């Protein structure tokens, strides 16, 4: 395995766990986040908070936010400011396609590839790209599927000298959010950090409240809470609804009811 890695860090649960995985397996870790005008921009605050926490607790992460917010008025998606309302319900329903951002992962991948290749050229060592794509995303997001990754990688290698010095680290490609969270539980122990301190510094909600607290009805939140239910631990993020802040038990009960209805 390479010594150097560039992580695409959204600030969500998946990529944050991936960051922990990279810290456990690489010597030099660079994390990139992208500001593309997303409604849930609180995820960028959480990503910075997580990096700060990790760096203050014996880890070493180089971090930068890439500004792409000039695209906000040009992208048609429920996830960007000015777009339609983010739908609610189960994460595998067709209406979740409204949360697709056109070509998002291609844009992110191109920048991440450029940074990884630059590190490889500068250090004269190989550098990996780490992506948190997982099986739960395959149905709704075509740019999370392996065939897209293969085609994108082929274009990168055709278009760049020394591209053979760049590899990929996608440990969660065949697992789901529950499997990712299980890995996170192991990784925090290996790294000597606190599970709740890590995961309260993540955002999975596509409909966060102005306070920054998470909703529990949008599909992304449902999928996250389901993972915590399966793991048997409480989610440390703060949940809110139209009545204000609610205990985790309310969010959990809503998701359990929704999952029961969906399975019928």
Image (cartoon, rainbow, N blue to C red):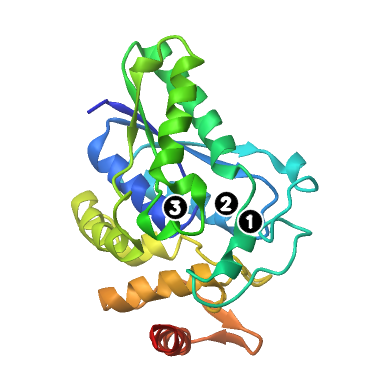
Residue that numbered label 1 is attached to: 41
Measured as percent of width and height from the top left, residue 82 is found at 79, 59
Measured as percent of width and height from the top left, residue 184 is found at 28, 58
Pick whichever, 31 or 222, lies toward us: 222
Front label number (1 vs 3): 1
C-alpha gap between disc 1 and disc 3: 15 Å
Mark linked to residue 50:
3
In terms of sequence position, does the residue under pointer 2 or pointer 3 come before the other? 2
Which image quarter is the C terminus in? bottom left
Please tell me whether residue 51 is drawn above or below residue 78 in the rendered image.
above
C-alpha gap between disc 2 and disc 3: 10 Å
**Residues at badges 2 and 1 in contact (C-beta under 8 Å)?**
yes
**Residues at badges 1 and 3 in contact (C-beta under 8 Å)?**
no
Pick whichever, 60 or 263, lies toward us: 263
Q: Report the residue at 44% width, 19% height from top.
A: 157
Residue that numbered label 2 is attached to: 44
Neighbours of disc 3 within 10 Å: few (<14), some (14-19), many (20+)? many
Which image quarter is the N terminus in? top left
Please tell me whether residue 172 is drawn above or below residue 85 in the rendered image.
above
| Residue 233 visible in image | no
Q: Secondary structure at mark 1?
A: loop
Neighbours of disc 1 within 10 Å: few (<14), some (14-19), many (20+)? many
């Amino acid at each position: 395995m390479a010594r150097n890695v560039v992580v695409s860090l959204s600030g969500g649960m998946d990529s944050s766990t991936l960051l922990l995985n990279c810290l456990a397996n690489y010597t030099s870790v660079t994390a990139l986040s992208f500001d593309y005008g997303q409604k849930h921009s609180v995820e960028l605050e959480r990503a910075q908070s997580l990096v700060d926490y990790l760096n203050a607790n014996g880890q070493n992460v180089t971090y930068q936010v890439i500004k792409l917010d000039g695209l906000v008025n040009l992208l048609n998606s429920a996830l960007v400011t000015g777009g339609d309302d983010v739908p609610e319900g189960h994460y595998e329903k067709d209406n979740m396609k409204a949360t697709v951002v056109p070509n998002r992962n291609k844009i992110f991948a191109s920048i991440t590839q450029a940074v990884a290749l630059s590190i490889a050229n500068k250090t004269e060592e190989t550098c990996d790209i780490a992506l948190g794509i997982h099986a739960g995303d395959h149905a709704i997001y075509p740019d999370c599927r392996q065939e897209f990754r293969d085609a994108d990688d082929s274009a990168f290698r055709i278009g760049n000298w020394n591209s053979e010095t760049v590899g990929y680290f996608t440990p969660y490609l065949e697992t789901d959010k529950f499997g990712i969270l299980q890995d996170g539980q192991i990784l925090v122990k290996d790294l000597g950090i606190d599970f709740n301190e890590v995961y309260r510094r993540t955002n999975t909600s596509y409909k966060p409240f102005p306070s920054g607290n998470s909703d529990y009805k949008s599909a992304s939140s449902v999928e996250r809470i389901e993972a915590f239910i399966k793991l048997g631990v409480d989610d440390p993020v703060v949940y809110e609804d139209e009545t204000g802040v609610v205990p985790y038990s309310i969010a959990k009960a809503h998701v359990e009811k929704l999952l029961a209805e969906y399975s019928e």
